[in-house]
Image (cartoon, rainbow, N blue to C red):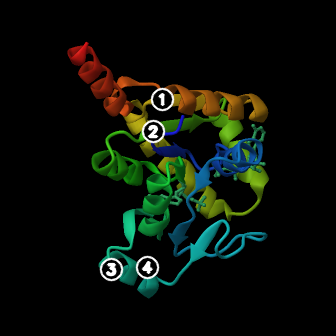
Amino acid sequence: MSNRKGIIIVVSGFSGAGKGTLMKALIARYPGYALSVSATTRDPRPGEENGREYFFVSNEEFEKLIKENGLIEHAGYVNHYYGTPRKFVEDKLSQGIDVILEIEIQGALQIKEQYPDAVLLFVMPPSAKELEKRLRGRGTETDEVITQRLKRAKEESIGIEKYDYIVVNDDLEECVDRLHQIIGAAHQSPMRNLELIDTIRNELNEL
Ligand code: ADP
Ligand code: 5GP
């Protein structure tokens, strides 16, 4: 559709639920989405590249970004800052491209306030035991940080009702397709098609 508007898709979920894996698989299968790269003060994990998974910055650099209004949202998560650079998101939306933000709940709620037509998706693991298994199996955090992240998951579970949709990440490929279908359906909602509604009303008045 030529006048299709880009929307923000927020993807949240407990650490270890599989958000990063899912987003990579989604973009690989459906390359039309733009995935926002966040800034963070945490250290890169083995295999992560500056500018690809995150922009890895110092505390001072992060605070400068906040001061210059360079972030559309930011939040603290287990001892570190995370935030979404403004320019990439605004550029893609203005080109009619959907932008995916893989961010935690405080940031998700800041986005919903600024962009009421954003779609908020929550990725769930099949069970809490499976979550712990995935988080430990990833092998990228110390036991202490894993414990903090599981504690944070408990807190985040209180906010799940604020999201528009839940997707259970059981079979990865099925989950990717469900995500794509939900985004497609969201584009068809009346609130995201106000111009189309206006046009048909005007046309009806002129009959
Ligand atoms: P998050 O980004 O939510 O913290 P990751 O994408 O890093 O989570 O995934 C955590 C671990 O779980 C990784 O080792 C990943 O390979 C694994 N994983 C992700 N999705 C699935 C899935 N559907 N089934 C089994 N393992 C998965
Ligand atoms: P991780 O350290 O595992 O990559 O990410 C930790 C948490 O921070 C995850 O819940 C992830 O979704 C969230 N996160 C990543 N980038 C951002 C961001 O730009 N803003 C916010 N608010 N959260 C983010």
In which quarter of the view is residue 192 placed?
A: top left
Q: CA distance from mark 2 to mark 3?
A: 27 Å
Residue at left 37%, top 84%?
Answer: 64
Residue 142 can be seen, yes or no: yes
Q: Foreground: 151 or 113?
A: 113
- Helix, strand, or loop for circle 4? helix
Q: Position of residue 51 (x, y in %)?
A: 64, 73
Q: In the image, is residue 136 above or below residue 203?
A: below
- The residue that mark 2 highlights is 120
Q: Amino acid at mark 3?
A: Glu
Residue carrying label 1: 186
For marks 2 and 4, the one nearer the N-term is 4
Observer-side mark, 1 or 2, equals 1
Q: Secondary structure at mark 2?
A: strand
Q: CA distance from mark 3 to mark 4?
A: 10 Å
Three-letter amino acid code at disc 1? Ala
Disc 1 crowd, CA 10 A, few/some/many (<14, 14-19, 20+)? some
Mark 2–mark 4 Cα distance, whole angstroms, equals: 25 Å
The yes-or-no answer for disc 3 within 8 Å of ligand 2 is no
- Residue 68 is marked as 3
x, y (%) of residue 53?
66, 65
| 18 horizontally vs 106: left or right | right
Residue at point 33%, 52% (across, down): 110
Callout 4 amino acid: Phe
Local crowd at mark 4 within 10 Å, few (<14), some, or many (≥20)?
many
Mark pair 1, 4: CA separation: 33 Å
Marks 3 and 4: which is nearer the front? 3
Q: Where's residue 118, x and y in %?
A: 40, 42
Residue occupied by mark 4: 62
**Circle 3 sits in a helix, a strand or a loop, which is it?**
loop
